Amino acid sequence: MRASLVGVILALMLIVAFMAGRQTSTPPAAPPAGTLPVSAEAASAEARTIAVFRAARDSVVAITTSTRIVDPFTRRAGETPLGSGSGFVWDEAGHVVTNDHVIREASRATVQLADGRSLPARVVGRDPGHDLAVLRIEGRDLPAPLPRPEAGEGALQVGQSVLAIGNPFGLDWTLTTGIVSALDRELPGEAGRMIRGLIQTDAAINPGNSGGPLLDARGRLVGVNTAIYSPSGASAGIGFAVPVAVAARVVPQLIETGRYAPPSLGLGFDARINAAVNRQGLTGALVLEVAPGSQAEAAGIVPARLARGVLLPGDVIRALDGEAVEGLDDLLARIDRRRAGEEVTLSLERDGRRREVTLTLRSG
């Protein structure tokens, strides 16, 4: 009898302890009303995006342009608004990089900073071939330049996250995000010459974003937003940017001399004649001029020439460093990626015979 009573007491004690444990345990915290649970990884990615925007915002500028007009009747001159775009601070000296088409035909440009200041800007240099231009502003406490990847760091990859900051449709300091959709794209540029090596992105880029920065997930400049592909004129998920490596080559020359001169072979070409030759089925770049006293002349390169209305054959550049040259645009784009002082090997053809010569690229 006593043993059974002890058993009952022990059972009751176990039940009481179990119930007490359930009452004192802390239930998991529920998310606030009206919100969805977010993973730590997603929250971290969101925090990084916010941090990149806050760090880069002040270095991005809005650009408005105007042009001078003269009334044909009163002969009075005045300024009329021309357009708007974006840009970003390149260095501590107040140089601002934007697209050439943003300032094309403008007689005056004004740069608005994120702190509300509007400063007059002077055009320092233009390069229509890469759709890049440099302005300069002066003032106290100018924003810091955007950071750029160090030389030799990993190349941009398709699928990599990118962020675009600009002023689309006049809505200043707008952030859009996306990925690198493709690399080495090309678009028609000024005078029919192709702009090659562009970055394609699905980060929304609209009119007014032109000239703004394309950043990687660490907030480093990887491109200059330049154009969209859209029948409606609004973003359709296909935008293009000039790679930072191209800007790093072009911008210092624009600052120093006001123009960009790519490396030169010491040879002369004609785009229209070359295009006509290519349409006849001849691939390559037809040489039409050899600089006197140049290494090209010393190497025996002979230009084609007109005599009594007949085009006499000369050397045709068929390959550069072993890679076939399809046409003049192809040749010039590949030379443009090089630097003065580098050596290149040209495969030439004349009268059905091929030979190779090595030339050192000179300053344009």
Image: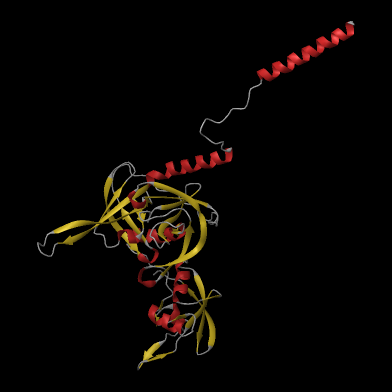
Q: At 89% from the left edge and 8% from the top edge, which residue is drawn? A: 3
Q: At 48% from the left edge and 55% from the top edge, which residue is drawn? A: 202
Nearer to us in this view, 30 or 252: 30
Q: Position of residue 257 (x, y in %)?
A: 33, 62
Q: Position of residue 356 (x, y in %)?
A: 53, 80
Q: Residue furthest bottom?
A: 308
Q: From the viewer's perspective, is 140 left or right of 152?
A: left
Nearer to us in this view, 203 or 20: 20
189 up-or-down from 234: above or below? below
Residue 173 visible in image: yes
Say which quarter of the image contains residue 254.
bottom left
70 up-or-down from 87: above or below? below
Q: Residue furthest front?
A: 1
Assign the C terminus to one quadrant of the image.
Answer: bottom left
Assign the N terminus to one quadrant of the image.
Answer: top right
Q: At 42% from the left edge and 56% from the top edge, which residue is drawn? A: 235
